[in-house]
Amino acid sequence: MTSILRVGPTIEVIELDEVRLQILGVGEAFTLTDERRYIRDLVAWCDGTRSEDEVRSLLMARLSDGNKLIDFLKARHILVEAQDCRPGDPLVDYIASAALPFASLRDERRRQTSLNMSSICLVGNGALANECHEAMSALGLNFVDKDADLTLALSDVMDHASMRELNRGAIANRDTILFASLDRFNIRVGPLVVPGETACFECYHHRLRSQLHFQREFDARTERRHLIGGASAPSSVITRAGAALVCTSVIGFVFQHMSLGRPNVLIEQDLLSNSLLSQPILKLPRCPVCGPGRTESLQRDIYSPVAA
């Protein structure tokens, strides 16, 4: 028996008029002529109850080259194989569909052959970590306590002190690590640190700090020296948006899809201005953590301010 064929969970089919249809996917849209209603009938048949063979037979009875239409829609992930047709979490479905060409990540076959071969060590216990754990578990990723393919360091706040400490441990153990955090209405994912090859979080911290005029204020905030505020749980909207960005980057790393999970890059999304920025993170020549001149006995951060 062949697999069940269904319309992708994030696909929208819109009737423009009696002849034309618009199909909206993730990142692309198609306007198709459907004068004889072949496409309308096809998407109605792909409701999760018919096998692919049955759908092809139904269409071929009306359209001689119906197989070409089905193959085209499958190649665009408009029609997907789905043995398990139970409704899923929309967030998980969007993550899977956004990571083209991996729109079938929810299929059991894909879980067994791809994502389940990768292991994640998740560090963090806040709302972002919980949301990411739930989404990545639904996508089939494995979680381990050590010897992971990727360590994922997550925080609900801008906590550079903890991130820098995790960075030092990852460099010392030669663990690949991806940092991500929420900062009020901002989501930051990166850098993805590959020890010995890329810039590390320490490089990012000092390059960011060097560009600021108010460095003492930056230090106080990133070291979490708050008297009021800064400890409340983030909005569920921001948390789920952050989880989508983090999980898509993790999938990019797993499949080496470099447009999604790239080393030496920081992705920042501002939910208030609806902007998404991507900027490179360059190695610091004298980085005390990943630079060539680092020593285990280094007592003072060479980039830290010296007391007057």
Image (cartoon, grey):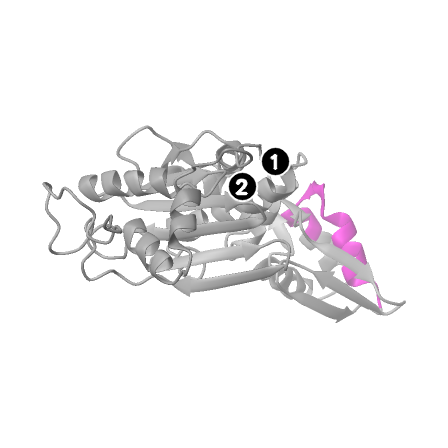
Q: Is residue 52 magenta?
A: yes
Amino acid type assigned to the residue bearing label 1 in the image? Asp
Q: Nearer the viewer, residue 52 or 123?
A: 123
Q: Tell whether label 2 touches label 1 (CB within 8 Å).
A: yes
Taking the view exactly as shown, the residue that stands out farthest to the front is 308
Q: Is residue 205 magenta?
A: no
Q: Which residue is mark 2?
A: 107
Q: Nearer the viewer, residue 80 or 65?
A: 80
The boundaries of the magenta stretch are 36-55
Taking the view exactly as shown, the residue that stands out farthest to the right is 18
Q: Nearer the viewer, residue 306 or 50?
A: 306
Magenta part mainly helix, strand or loop? Answer: helix
* Disc 1 to disc 2, C-alpha distance: 7 Å
What's the residue at 68%, 54% (across, down)? 56
Disc marking residue 84: 1
Q: Classify residue 41 as left or right of residue 285.
A: right
Give the mark nearer the N terminus: 1 vs 2.
1
Residue 141 place in picture, x, y as percent = 43, 37
Residue 183 place in picture, x, y as percent = 52, 46
Q: Residues within 10 Å of mark 1 (few under 14, many from 20)?
A: few
Helix, strand or loop at label 2? It is loop
Q: Classify residue 89 as left or right of residue 295.
A: right
Helix, strand or loop at label 1? It is loop
Residue 165 place in picture, x, y as percent = 29, 38
Residue 244 appearing in the image = yes
